[in-house]
Image (cartoon, rainbow, N blue to C red):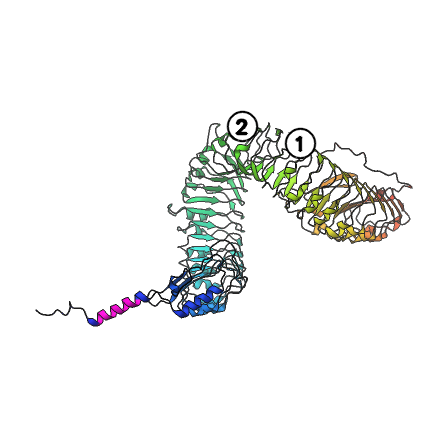
Amino acid sequence: MAWNAAASPNPLFCLFWMSLLFASATAQLCMEKERKALLDVRSGLSVADGRLSSWRGEDCCKWEGVECHNITSHVVKLDLSYLDGSTPNKSEVSSSLLDLEHLTFLDLSGNNFGGARIPTFLGSLTQLEHLDLSQGGFSGRIPYQLCNLSKLHHLALDNNGIEGTISETIVLLGNLQFLDLGLNNISGEIPESIGNLSKLSVLDLSSNRIFGAIPGSIGNLAALQNLDLSGNQISGQIPNSVGNLRQLEEVSMSHNNISGSVPSSLGGMCNMNRIDLRDNRITGELAEFFEQLSRCRNDIRLSLSLQNNEISGPLPIHMEKLQRLVQLDLGSNSLNGSIPTSLGKLSQLLLLNLSSNYLVGGLTEAHFANLTSLLSMDLSHNNLSVNASSGWLPPFHANVIAMGSCNLGPKFPPWLQNQNRLNSLDISNTGISDFFPEWFWSLCTPLMRLNVSHNHMRGVLPSSLECFGLVRIFDLGYNNLEGFIPRMPYVGLYLDLSHNSLSGPIPESLAGDNLGFILLSDNRLNGSIPSSICTTYLQIVNLANNGLSGALPDCWSNSPYLIIMDVSSNILSGGIPATLGLLNMLQSLHLSNNNLTGAIRSTLQQCRELTVIDLSLNELSGGIPSWIGWSLLSLRVLSLRSNKLSGEIPWQLSLCPSLQVLDLAHNSLSDPLPPSFGKFISMATRQNDKELVPLNRGSSYYTDSVIITAKGSQLLYTRTLSLVTSIDLSNNNLFGEIPEELTNLHGLRFLNLSWNHFSGNIPDEIGLMGELESLDLSKNHLSAANLHQLVLHGQPSALWGTITDQVPRRQPTHWSSRRRGHARR
């Protein structure tokens, strides 16, 4: 029988495969040199979470986060990422990584390298294909040595403190597919060479300080699928070359200074599922962009966000062609015209925001006919109305409906009756003049935000609203509601029932401990203020213009975050609570027009953030504390008017560098006026040259106001208060000469020294105080001998009467019997 050589195995061939099988069986024992290198790397890392507890024994290839080549046993992958969520202890990158010469994958993300610079030696790991140092606490510049990693296809350096610019040498990383430099402090322009990274599919430069224009070469990134340039200072127009990125699926350029129009080619990129160009300076109309968008197939859904730009023109007539849209956000632009009924055919639309534009006209049932998927609708701040039959109900069940400042009245909108999934409803300032229907309060949805303010809602609220569960915002302010404050749901942030006709006491259990804003001003509330109002996270409390009585509760140590307190115009008595001095963040304190007695609390000197103190129209006694001058350096308004304060005016008040309104009138202050009063820094310069800025951080919810008595009238200043400069020391017992230094206050607008005992000559330079609108020196003992020398440049002749009307002896005037039933301010 003949031997078949072809069927018989070759002994050498068998020996070769046996050796390979043996090598494969023993390959998982790692190299000793690399095992020691790994242990050195581990010694530099924080291992408090126990993630490296498996790093024991001789075979490092079995250690967690380590992967070896299945034949050569060299370490090729090292994943030491920290994903616990907490901040780990400080670590350092060991240079022993250089002994891992075959490493292709290195992930050190999430560790805390404590502001260290990215090690330059990482550029010697030339086999690396994947490098992730994100969220590592690195700082400094990106080392140029990283450009040696020519095989790198994934580079993540995001969420660090990296500075400097993006180098032109980035072109050397020609194999990059993923580049994330977001959330750093990188500045400079995007280099033109970025367009040479032709394999990039993800480019994220977001949340840096990059400026300049987007380079046209970005259109060369033909493989790009995700582009994020948001949160920078990029300017100029979006280059037309962006239209070449046919694979692009997501683009975000929001929060920049981009101008020009939206390129129509962007609408023709049919793979796109997200376009976010919010918060820029984009202008022009959208007709061509929407025309291109309508030509794409409808199987890829698109979220389009162009909010807060300067886009103008009408909405497209044939919106039914935009069936791709699941999100349409065009809020805060300059769109005009009416909303086409074709909008109602976008059956896939989940979010619609057309707020804060110039849209007009009525919305009919056809506008909503097929919006069956709609979850969020914001049409607020337009001139729109809803014209629907009384029995009509929308086809959607939204989570968010916002139609503030539209025309929905005078009846309460009956079409809200089936909206039982709401967690946010804003129908403020909509012309509703009606009672709340019973079905509204019986919805009992877990309403998170409710705003029906600035209407003419009438009637009495239900005795309990607790069925609504957790409420984040509950705003019924500026209506005509009567009755008692009901038992409230757990309000987690904002409660506003102000400017109604509510009566009775403030409930002991008003709301939850997380309540940050309590606004109950301008009602008819009575009784005492419960100590439960001092909630842990309270920031603003406004109970002004009510009939509240008793002592102000001394519980403010429970509210360390309070920045504004206004309990003015009530009937409160007793002293100023000592615990107010524990409010280190307090900025505005309004206790005016009450019956408070005693001295000004010395503990207030710890409130070093105070900008406004108004204790006027009370019965406070004692002296004006000198510590106001050297403790409250942020103070801008101090009103102690109409109290029973006595003694001298402390010269230290002039140490307040920001003080611009000082009202000490109608007290019993004596002694000469300190010459240092000519050193008020904020009164020495023109306020009109300064920006109109609020006096507190809570200006969105509260506006400080002060009454200035001038020209025989009471002038109320609110939003322009920051531009007012005034000194009123009238109706006291001050004597001596008017200090010449007072004429240094060239920015002073109102000065009233009347009804005192000032004597001597009027300062010669007083006529050079060019900003003065009102000057009253009447009812003193001043000499008229030098009147002919005074030159009141540009001042009204009416001021002369306030200078020349002097009396031999002043009849003291004090508001000890002032009217308590004052008009509301």
Q: Residues within 10 Å of mark 2 (few under 14, many from 20)?
A: few
Residue 143: image location, x then y, percent: 50, 67
Between residues 658 and 351, which one lies in front from this camera angle?
658
Query: Is residue 405 visible in this depiction of the protein?
Result: no
Label 1 secondary element = strand
Q: Residue at x 74, y 53 (%)?
A: 657
Q: Which residues are magenta?
A: 12-23
Q: Read off the residue under disc 2.
A: 437
Residue with the mark numbered 1? 525
Q: Residues within 10 Å of mark 1 (few under 14, many from 20)?
A: many
- For the C terminus, the quadrant is top right
Residue closer to the observer: 522 or 715:
522
Which SS does the magenta portion mostly show?
Answer: helix
Q: Is residue 794 left or right of residue 189?
A: right
- Whole-Å distance between the Cαs marked 2 and 1? 25 Å
581 versus 67 height, above or below = above
Where, by quadrant of the figure, is residue 394 drawn?
top left
